[in-house]
Amino acid sequence: MSEQMNATASERAAVSADVVLSVSDLRIVLDPSGIDIDDDVTLAIHAGEVLGLVGESASGKTTAATSLLAHQRRGARIAGGKITIEGTDILSASHAALRHIRGGLISYVPQDASAALNPALRIGTQLLEILEAHSFGASKAEREARLSEMMAEVLLPSERAFLRRYPHQLSGGQQQRVAIAMALANRPKVIVFDEPTTALDVTTQAHVLTTIRALTHSYGVSALYVTHDLAVVANLADRIAVMYAGRLVEIGPKEELFAGAFHPYTRKLLAAIPDISGTHALRGIPGWAPRPGQRVPGCAFTPRCDMAIERCAGEYPPYEGSGPDHQVRCWRWEEVRAQAPSHDVLLAQRVASDSAEAEVIGVRDVIAYYQRKETLHGISASLREHRCLALVGESGSGKTTLARCIAGLHPFKIEGDIELRGKALERDARSRSVAERQAIQYIFQSPYSSLNPRKTIRQILSQPLRVFFDLSKNEMEDRAARVLEQVALDSSLMGRYPDQLSGGERQRIAIARALAAEPAVLICDEVTSWLDVSVQAAIIELLVKLQHEVGVCMLFVTHNLALIHSISQEVAVMNEGVIVEYGPVAEVLGDPKAEYTRKLLADTPTI
Amino acid sequence: MSAPDATPELLAAVTPAEKRPAQWIVTIREAWRMGRTKAGVIIFVAIVALALLGPLFAPDSPTSFVGAPFAGPSAKAWLGTDYIGHDVLSRVLWGGRTVIGLALAATVIGLLLGVGLGMISGYARRWVDETVMRILDIVLAFPSIVLALLFVSIVGPKLWLIVLMVGISHAPRIARVTRAATVEIAQRDFIKSAEALGVARRKILAFEILPNITSPLLVEFGLRLTYSIGLIAGLSFLGFGLQQPAADWGLMINENRIGITVQPWPVAVPVILIGILTIGTNLVADGLGRALIGIERDTGGT
């Protein structure tokens, strides 16, 4: 390993002479409160290098990234620090100078290209506008030549018919490529990518990532790639910077970070990332990242860190590390470095794989419609006692439709049978018996939408209790406290409202509400997709634990193939309303038979 | 076994509130911080106080004759007399109750009808929604005053009928606002969650949806109250409200308009008071509306 580290270090040394962008002591605060969003951010990007900027929500990564273009969202202000691109001081530049710098020296690719492109202008017009604004070339012909060149660079057709399209006539991936082409137009030195693939399906994401990789390599453009997903930058970035609560906690070469990070947070973050190969167990980080204004004076990770010492909470550690290329901010980084990364065995895979378990839910040749359009074309599957079936597919594959059909929440026509322990269920939850409704509980994707904001946690949890059980007030309180305990929450939260809780806590409440009904089946619909990776891992841990301890059977709907190993024993891969592959996890992921599964596996980013 | 840490997540750094005020109360608090709301409330309270307490201070009975018709202001009658010699000041002090009382009653009726219909159609969707909304569109197609006149001319100038008609004429607009707010809430997952549990529809409407839409309804109430005042006063002016010799601001404008050049006070004072009253309610409605948008902007993150 040391050889590898030496090799990368020397590689770095070769390019480090050539710093394109440097940021020092950047501090960004909220006006007028003066609360810091970002503080002490120091980093450099070399020529042709891709720096991945990784952080969870509210870590200040996007705020830091947009400040590289001297732009701040309303209410935020750059309070200190220096940013230079090729010797030009960005923060002291005049408005007129900034117009040339933005798009000329440094450009920006937003998260949502569909919102960034003007829906009323043809894409050719929009792309030419960028070139004209920066007076690219001497003539219109020259600009049009550059336009075709740009389209070729992002692997889009440059014929007239395509350029005459409006943004809505393009797919999400094509729109994102157009946004990248716009960023490339005037051959900037640095491009800031702000989570450009978050809204895209894995297949499209894989294409966009390939494009970005190819561009930075062939044109020597440097890039800052902002993301919450370490797996995305694993193959793309040369170095990775990790942000936590507005500070850069670690920055270093990718290989070194993945092999043995110096900061406890980086290590835990890596352990929380689901791994498609299923070689390590998912470990969540208890708690959540503090928002601006809630941070302790010292290292903000202190409350969640199991290595924290007294000094951590009071004093922020300086930048230290093995060399200028690998810097870390932790008092105990040398001890962290000495620790070997731990590997746990996957709990989900320890469940005995005995297919003779009794069937709880049987889905037989189900055809479902959306209004008059057929969206599920003959689906059969079964959920067995003590087991978890993962339902995987991209958006529009029909996975949520199937989940809702089982829960009795599909408002349109269904043909075929859905059975609960051999007895056919009515289509609509309301027409089902109380016992049938109780047996199947649904956990929704967004914990921000699934809890009534006007109700306390107590009221939310007592709803299923009131519907399904005849309990006294005290019994109800006891039951509510017990389910809270099952999801590892304190009963002191009972009097709170959902918006006083973090996203992870809210999702735990939603799980507790489902558990309160004492169901036989839990249907989890993308329950982690709104959560940070560290919280996602904690929720997965909780669900696996419940599967063991409560013995509930589960349908786990997800778009993320990497999660499957950690939670389920069986998997069904869906595409365009049909199940293309169905079987034990190890078989399907280890030796996929369907072409679609293979493609999905290849496109899923891994560490 | 390596069970996940049972450490409860850290408590959010907010003060735990055992009981939270209802949504509409929050809107009122937010609105109260604005100058326009305060001004509106002061105006409204002043006029309502004048209408309610006025009779206690009236120098004369509103129906007794104190002088010659259309006599100008004097020490005996500060605002002069009206077309048959009643004291204008006394009639003004007596005449506000009906306008305000009827307007409030009509608005409440409109709110009950509109909220009921709006919530049902916003939650039921499909054909129920279509049917209800199209019927309301037909009602909307008639100008409210024409609708009211139509029924009043059939049944006769009964106060209850006027209140009912003004209420009915408000219902479609309130229903639309309610429906829009309901549709937004009804598509959230906590409604589906309640449906999956089999909670009765009326309970979902009353306990899941209604508490989440009280703020827009409050704004709508303020706005409709303003229109009610205008409509009720207008109907009185046209002779469909209280009948002579009762004192009523709308009626006063009508009966004294012929003498406006000789003795403007019996027309001018009611006009000004009705005008100020609607400005007051409008300011409050505007403040509430702004508070509503402000609150939505602050919390509508996700």
Image (cartoon, coloured by chain):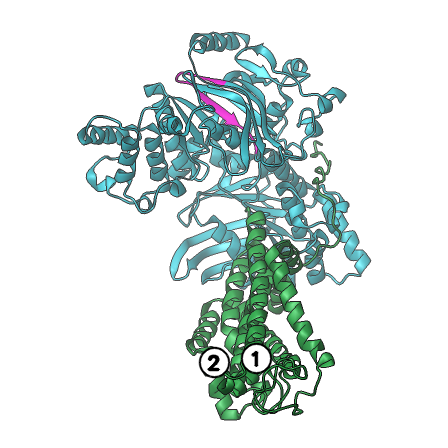
Chain colours: A cyan, B green
Chain of the residue under label 1: B
Query: In the image, is residue A511 part of the stretch drawn in magenta?
Result: no
Q: Could you tell me which residue is drawn at 71 percent across and 54 percent down?
A: B20
Q: Position of residue A90 (x, y in %)?
A: 45, 23
Closer to viewer: mark 2 or mark 1: 1
* A354 lies left or right of A65: right
Query: In the image, is residue A49 part of the stretch drawn in magenta?
Result: yes
Amino acid under label 2?
A: Ile
Q: Vertically, is A258 above or below B285?
A: above
Range of residues picked out in magenta: A44-56
Q: Vertically, is A50 above or below B235?
A: above
State the CA–CA distance, disc 2 to disc 1. 27 Å
**In this orientation, which residue lies closer to the viewer: A137 or A160?**
A137
Task: Please check whether the numbered discs 2 and 1 fall on a single chain.
Answer: yes
SS of the residue under disc 2: helix
Residue linked to disc 1: B265
**In this orientation, which residue lies closer to the viewer: B39 or A216?**
B39
Residue linked to disc 2: B145
Q: Could you tell me which residue is drawn at 18 percent across and 30 percent down?
A: A141
**In this orientation, which residue lies closer to the viewer: A403 or B156?**
B156
Chain of the residue under label 2: B
Q: Position of residue A267 (x, y in %)?
A: 61, 23
Q: Could you tell me which residue is drawn at 42 percent across and 54 percent down?
A: A378
